[in-house]
Amino acid sequence: MKASKKKLEAAHKDLDQSDGATPSMKSPSAQARENTTVSKATSSQYLDRGRMLINRYKRQQGLPQDYDDFSATEFVAWLISNKPDLKSSTWRVYRQAAYHTLMGKPDPDIDVALDMLDNDIVEGDEASGKRSGKQDRLAKRTSAMKEKKFPKAEMDMVFAYLQYKSRSKMAPILRDWLEATVHTGLRPVEWRATAFQSYQDPKTKRRYCWLYVLNAKATNARGNGVVRTLDLSELPSPIMNAVARMSSRGLEWHEEGRFDNVKSQVGQLLYTIGEDIFPRRKKHFSLYSCRHQFVANMKSVLEPAEVSALSGHVVTRTAREFYGRAQSAWGIDDIGPHARPIAEEVATVQQSADFYEARIENLKLAGVLHGNTNSEFPS
């Protein structure tokens, strides 16, 4: 499994999977935009903010302010635990501040800590910073018109339309894209760089399958990227086969330089079908609707840390409105056998979840938050 993840990282070391999400300003971070620089004044501000965050971490954990032998990975886990209570713009500043500050810390686990920051993508404000003010406002209005869920009944109607009415050559591809995404939760752009691996036990004849997803920019000073793993072994064969086809096609399209074009055609077909089947809907379905639905479904059957590990994110306060809620989940029979995260990736998220839940409980004890405040880690 580790060998497969390393192979995926190496094969796509120059691919920016944060396209479609908002990277931060230029910094040592792997998420920084190319061809931009940071002034000395800005760098100094990042360092000051980074030291402030470290001091807050020490205070909350009961560590002496002059104690510098703290764990870098534990600090990053604590920092990520604050993310659900922050605006996306604030979180980007915090992440950059942590990067600038930790780069100078001579810890044996510093690479692991920085990888945890590399693994972060700010979702929910994809257009921000990439367009003019007018274009940015238009993009946000367009996003507001996209459905943040994909009910089972409506998806079945789309599938029936694709099979019996559509004459588009993209119909089989759209079918696989929807089927694979609603069972894996991949962002549309993430299908560019995945690896599907299957193994059949010769004794039990059971089939084991994993999908490795490159979910962060893989160009940084340490030359490695971040891959999340989805265990798909329990999925029915037809769904597993759709995932395998999407994994193969996405890589092929990317290598041929036509991934964006295919994605646009498939997305347009879905929009056209929606106009035909659901002419009175105020919001239309998009490829991203399947990811929202996947998250909603998983929230109803898995723990928050497991959902975050599977979907490759911890949400900011700004982004919470962009993700399907548990009440939008399909019925348990419709969800059926589902993807599962691997233990080591859940453990990384769980550390942040533990920090978050402990902080909420302490704030309740201090009277800062109401006693009925939910302390469960948002996903």
Image (tube, rainbow, N blue to C red):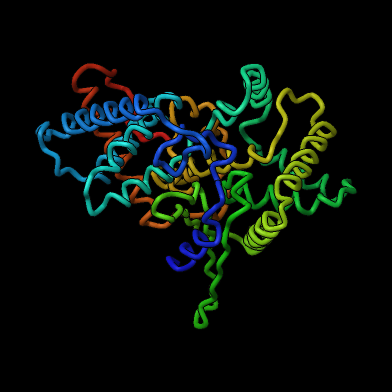
| Residue 125, quarter of the rendered image | top right
Q: Is residue 39 left or right of residue 180?
A: left
Total marks placed:
0
Q: Position of residue 167 (x, y in %)?
A: 90, 48
Residue with the most extreme front position = 40
Q: Which quarter of the figure is the N terminus placed in?
A: bottom left
Q: Position of residue 81 (x, y in %)?
A: 33, 35
- 203 vs 347, nearest the viewer: 347
The picture places residue 24, in percent across and down from the top left corner, at: 46, 33
Q: Where is 105 relative to 41, above or below?
A: below
Q: Quadrant of residue 367?
A: top left
Q: Is any part of residue 326 visible from this angle?
A: no
Quarter of the picture holding the C terminus: top left
- Relative to 201, is 176 on the left or the right? right
Residue drawn at 72 percent across, 38 percent down: 154
> Measuring 42% from the left and 57% from the top, which residue is drawn there?
342
- The quarter of the picture where residue 199 lies is bottom right
What residue appears at the point 43 percent right and 38 percent down from the top-left corner?
314
Judged left or right of residue 99, residue 37 is: right
| Frontmost residue, 111 versus 182 | 111
